[in-house]
Image (cartoon, grey):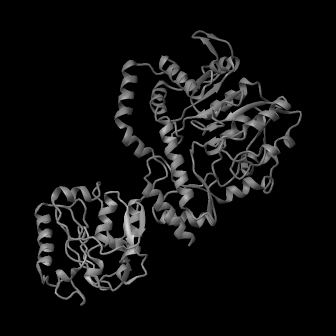
Amino acid sequence: MLYVSSDAVYSDSEKQISEQSETKPENLHGFMHLMRENILKLLNMKLCIVRPTLVYGSNDTHNGYGPNQFIRLAQSNQKISLFGQGEERRDHIHVNDVGNAIYFLIGKKYVGTVNLVTGNAISFFKIAQKIKDTYNVKLKYLKRKGPMPHNGYRAFNKNLLKKILPKKNNFIDIFDWIDKKEKYKKKMKIEFIDLKSRYKIERQEILKTLDKVLKKGHLVLTNELEEFEQKICQYTKRNYCLGLNSGTDALMMSLWALGIGKGDEVITSPTSFIATVGAITHVGAKPVFVDVKEDFNIDEDKIIKKINKRTKAIMPVHWTGRVCNMDKIKIIAKKYNLRIIEDAAQGMGAYYKKIHAGSFSDVAAFSTHPLKNLNALGDGGFITTNSKKIYTKIKLYRNHGMKKRDYVESYGVNSRLDVINAEVLKLRLKKLKSINDKRRQNACLYRNNLNNKFIKIPEDKKNEINSYVMLLSQAEKRDNLQKYLSSNKIQSLVYYGTPLHLHKATKKLGYKKGSLPVAEKLASKVLALPHHQNLSKGQILYVCKKINDFYN
């Protein structure tokens, strides 16, 4: 609560007010103020009372329409109607004192009392702007017609106060921005990874799922895994799916199933996780890099120049969950008789021209790593395909090449998605659309509130739906910005600062600095911002504000 006009409580508020200042209400109005405070204390209510003194204009000019009413409107999610824009006499308050009963120890059993003194003048406009940013409400400017309504001094009963105060036992400390003393500043902590908060939300569902699986004793290659695979087929509109123990294995097995091996070349992107090229090299083939576009995806117009008689496949990477330009890639593959393996590790729930990621190739590899939108409790992955032949081969490979328990047709590996994770993924698949929708909304919120002169996020195109496993920005002074964000308890990550062709592991391929200039430029500025579905609008606006503050 904010009370305006402490003249009613202190006899002369134009003088400096100290901790020892005696309250001398001069009229019934002042006694009512003190009475309400005592009633609230008796009711053991948590309260915040601030008394700024009006010194510009008469009481009739303001008529009580000030910060107290702004707070009330914001907390009830109503528009703030602001008369003037901080340039007229009536739009200012002069803070000479802050009165009794600022409850600043949330959760304690007593009311703390603080008096502060400042001679700063601050406009109603600035106050309204701050409250608007804190509560994410609309700010509306009105032209004054006649006297303002008398809304400032209505008595509060217990039920009304409960309704008005913020729900989660937090509050606005007006001196976060009037008085710049560090002890009154409360910083948000914005975490990049949402696994803890997600478990908190899903805890009962997860424990119930684990209990169900363990009671049955079905843990490996049982009906529950097949049910999950069928759910993925329905979601992606593909004929076949096989659960594996990682997205990396999904890539390797896709290559094996297509017969790609020693002496073959596979064209791919330098902007990806190391698993992309690791899978290619593990089957004995050679990765050939093609530079990327500003959206981090492979530049399809540069692929043809890299094709030779040894080229057997193209492996496009749908980085961040943005599907590559698969129309052009399919045309190139058909013309040169090449296979396509989609690295769709981040593509679950992503679409290109209303078609799900992984639907443009011979076979696609997906990851269910804990940091993916559709995430398991540990490593996991799966492939999708419309080819029964590829499906049959990979099904054999993932279980040691065994057709039956005592009959091995060919050497394979152990790469089976366990039933616990299959059941968890089946549960989370139901929530995937809402998760991706929220992440897209968060990306839009960043774009609309960041100063794009210094930090840019690739725009979404009309024909694509990005799943936003990561929200990557191109940030000037990236390293200094990251340090600044960290100092403000905002986590961010560099994904990744070194493109694949410049790692020690890929040195033998012959690439040097400058070989792929766009990928190198993007890597030098890339910064992933927190954007997961459990962040509030207020938290994202806070990140935007801190980023803009850094550049300003």
Residue 426 vs residue 515, the one in the foreground: 426
* Residue 113 in which image quadrant: bottom left
On screen, residue 357 above or below 442 = above
Residue at 21% across, 59% down: 161
Q: Is residue 183 visible?
A: no
- Which residue is located at x 29 percent, y 75 percent? 147
Left or right: residue 61 compared with residue 194 = left
Q: Which residue is at the far front? A: 146
For the question of whether residue 275 can be seen, the reply is: yes
- Indicate left or right for 10 with 312 as reference: left
User: Where is residue 211 drawn, in percent x and y?
Assistant: 36, 26
Query: What is the x, y in percent for residue 29?
Result: 14, 77
Q: Position of residue 250 (x, y in %)?
A: 64, 30
Q: Is residue 523 above or below residue 262?
A: below
| Percent x, y of residue 430 | 46, 32
Against 167, residue 118 (above or below) is below
Q: Residue at x 60, y 55 (%)?
A: 494
Please state if 249 lies on the left or on the right of 532 as rendered. Answer: right
Residue sitting nearer the eye, 85 or 209: 85
The quarter of the image holding the C terminus is bottom right
* Quadrant of the rendered image containing residue 200: top left
